[in-house]
Amino acid sequence: MPAVTGFFHAGVTVRDMEASLGFYRDGLGLDVHLDRVLDADYLRTVLALDFESIRAVYLTIPGGGFVELLEYRGIERLSAASRPNDFGAGHLCLYVEGIDELVERLRAVGGSARSAGVVDITSGPNEGARSIYMRDPDGYPVELFERKA
């Protein structure tokens, strides 16, 4: 019977890989698992795009899975930045510890937040937890979620 069997990765298209690595690797502290250039013909077919190549960097998420950063080359690229309420928008949510210090580290490498600071969750099943939506260098939202004590 068909079934979902696990989580592999979440992909984020970036404008400048080095700037994005500053956020995801240096700011969030995710380890680089793989950094390579992809140019196989099957990718052009499956994506239905005529690009030159893609630089792909896989960063390990503790507990399983990867964040896949993709920098397309040799094709027109436009910003897909949107507000959280715009359909088709998405975000990545990561469990974290030391959320206040992590936010400061991300701000030091150019990250910005939607809110003025970390927000205490005051109702519902996550009451007692803390959260903030940070934006990577291209505006992609990354939610940091610190579980309740």
Image (tube, rainbow, N blue to C red):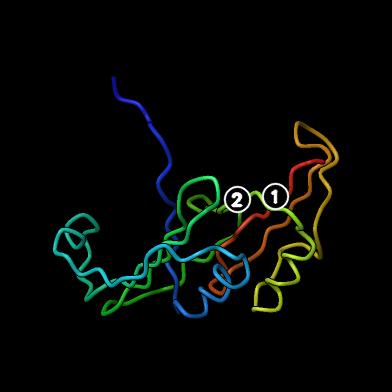
Instruction: Answer above or below: position of 135 versus 18.
Output: above
Identify the mark at residue 82; answer none if there is no mark: none
Q: Can you give x and y, in whole percent of width and height, for residue 146 in the image?
A: 73, 49
Query: Which circle marks residue 93 in the picture?
Result: 2
Q: Quadrant of residue 133?
A: bottom right
Are the residues tagged 1 and 2 within 8 Å (C-beta)?
yes
Q: Mark 1 is on which residue type?
A: Phe
Q: Which residue is mark 1?
A: 145
Question: Amino acid under label 2?
Answer: Cys
Which residue lies at the image location 79% right of the left edge and 62% below the top edge? 100
On-image quarter of the N terminus: top left
Q: On the picture, is 127 further left or further right than 84? A: right
Please name whichever residue, 96 or 85, is drawn nearer the observer in this view of the structure. 96
For the residue labelled by badge 1, is the local secondary structure a helix, a strand or a loop?
A: strand
For label 2, the SS is strand
Q: Residue at x 14, y 64 (%)?
A: 41
Task: Find residue 69 and report its image quarter.
Answer: bottom left
The answer to whether 77 appears left or right of 80 in the picture is: left
Q: Earlier in the sequence, mark 1 or mark 2?
A: 2
